[in-house]
């Protein structure tokens, strides 16, 4: 079935790409992925680790975010900000809004837990739910957030290049072709839950949100309405399928430090200053031949100092957190 989003001229003019990661919105998508059985090779190790750490409050919050279907919108606002600040925003949600969102969710999911009936009128219960959301974030996202931020930045660079070369049409056409189809002035979303309907934006604009855990296209009705889409598989952290990374314990290897010869330092610095640059752009900015730029980029990528994404006939390069640390250490020395 297809969900149709209708654009006006004003909506096309107000179509935007998320400027930064949205922690609670991504948390909802991660919670859905945790309860799904899709992508076992990529996510099962992460699922196993996360489930072993879930507190009672985290499991409480999880019941409001099913693998497929609706969840009350007030718990996962599509907003940029620090997690603690966003949770304060959730805690301060007006009672009527909480009640309305729960009624809408219950209409689609009659089996909502009995405690949700008291959520709008019980501040302590809402506070406990927020504690559960915080615990969920700690288990599902916190160990990987630095990598997520980096990967989403690379994806935004790719989408902005699409916009520069082909405008909004190319952006909507190429963001998620498996699940989204642009038929001007309508964006069609293929829905796995069988939903069929129409959403008229009426000049409120539209927001595209890249996601690490989204595996399809997920529509969020709001002001503006938004669609979450999966980033390229090349940008998804390998750590999800391996052991959990420990924040703050990254160390520079001796082999990495030997990379900082003059030319390679210039290449790394150029990539850091112009994230998402192509190999051709890298060569021009660093003042070296394209073949040399490609060779240096390969070595830096194999050392974990940059990440590269193939887009059509180009490779787009961005620094990793380790690359930035190494570069700053070199400059500081």
Image (tube, rainbow, N blue to C red):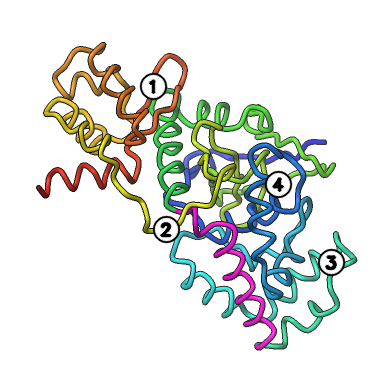
Which one is in front in this view, the residue at disc 3 or the one at disc 2?
A: 2
Q: Residues within 10 Å of mark 3 (few under 14, many from 20)?
A: some
Q: Residues within 10 Å of mark 2 (few under 14, many from 20)?
A: few
In the rendered view, tell whether residue 140 sits above or below residue 116: above
> How far apart are the two marked residues, 1 and 4, measured between alpha carbons?
37 Å
Name the element at disc 2: loop
Q: Residues within 10 Å of mark 1 (few under 14, many from 20)?
A: some
Q: Position of residue 26 (x, y in %)?
A: 57, 54
Name which residue lies at 27% across and 44% down: 324
Q: Give the mark nearest the N terminus, 3 or 1.
A: 3
Check if residue 132 falls in the magenta segment: yes
Classify residue 247 as left or right of residue 189. Answer: left
> How far apart are the two marked residues, 3 and 1, measured between alpha carbons?
47 Å
Q: Position of residue 159 (x, y in %)?
A: 45, 33
Residue position marked by numbered label 2 in the rendering: 247
User: Mark 3 and 2 residues: CB-CB less than 8 Å, in contact?
Assistant: no
Residue 199 circle label: 4
Residue position marked by numbered label 1 in the rendering: 315
Classify residue 195 as left or right of residue 23. Answer: right
């Amino acid at each position: 079935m297809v969900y149709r989003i209708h654009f006006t001229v004003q909506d096309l003019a107000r179509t935007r790409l998320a400027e930064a990661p949205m922690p609670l919105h991504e948390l909802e998508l991660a919670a859905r992925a945790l309860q799904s059985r899709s992508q076992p090779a990529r996510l099962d190790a992460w699922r196993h680790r996360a489930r072993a750490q879930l507190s009672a409050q985290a499991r409480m919050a999880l019941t409001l975010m099913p693998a497929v279907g609706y969840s009350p919108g007030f718990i996962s606002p599509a907003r940029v900000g620090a997690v603690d600040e966003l949770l304060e925003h959730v805690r301060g949600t007006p009672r009527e809004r909480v009640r309305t969102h729960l009624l809408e969710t219950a209409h689609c999911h009659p089996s909502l837990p009995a405690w949700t009936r008291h959520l709008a009128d019980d501040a302590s219960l809402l506070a406990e739910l927020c504690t559960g959301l915080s615990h969920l974030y700690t288990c599902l996202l916190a160990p990987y957030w630095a990598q997520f931020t980096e990967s989403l930045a690379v994806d935004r660079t790719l989408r902005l290049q699409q916009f520069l070369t082909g405008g909004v049409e190319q952006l909507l056409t190429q963001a998620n072709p498996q699940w989204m189809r642009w038929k001007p002035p309508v964006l069609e979303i293929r829905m796995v839950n069988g939903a069929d309907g129409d959403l008229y934006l009426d000049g409120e604009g539209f927001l595209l949100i890249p996601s690490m855990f989204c595996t399809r296209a997920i529509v969020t009705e709001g002001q503006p309405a938004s669609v979450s889409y999966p980033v390229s598989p090349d940008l998804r952290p390998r750590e999800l399928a391996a052991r959990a990374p420990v924040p703050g314990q990254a160390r520079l290897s001796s082999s990495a430090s030997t990379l900082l010869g003059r030319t390679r330092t210039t290449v790394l610095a150029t990539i850091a200053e112009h994230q998402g640059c192509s190999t051709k752009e890298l060569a021009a900015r660093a003042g070296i031949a394209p073949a040399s730029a490609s060779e240096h980029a390969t070595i830096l990528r194999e050392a974990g100092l940059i990440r590269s994404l193939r887009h059509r006939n180009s490779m787009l390069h961005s620094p990793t957190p380790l690359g930035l640390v190494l570069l700053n250490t070199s400059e500081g020395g």
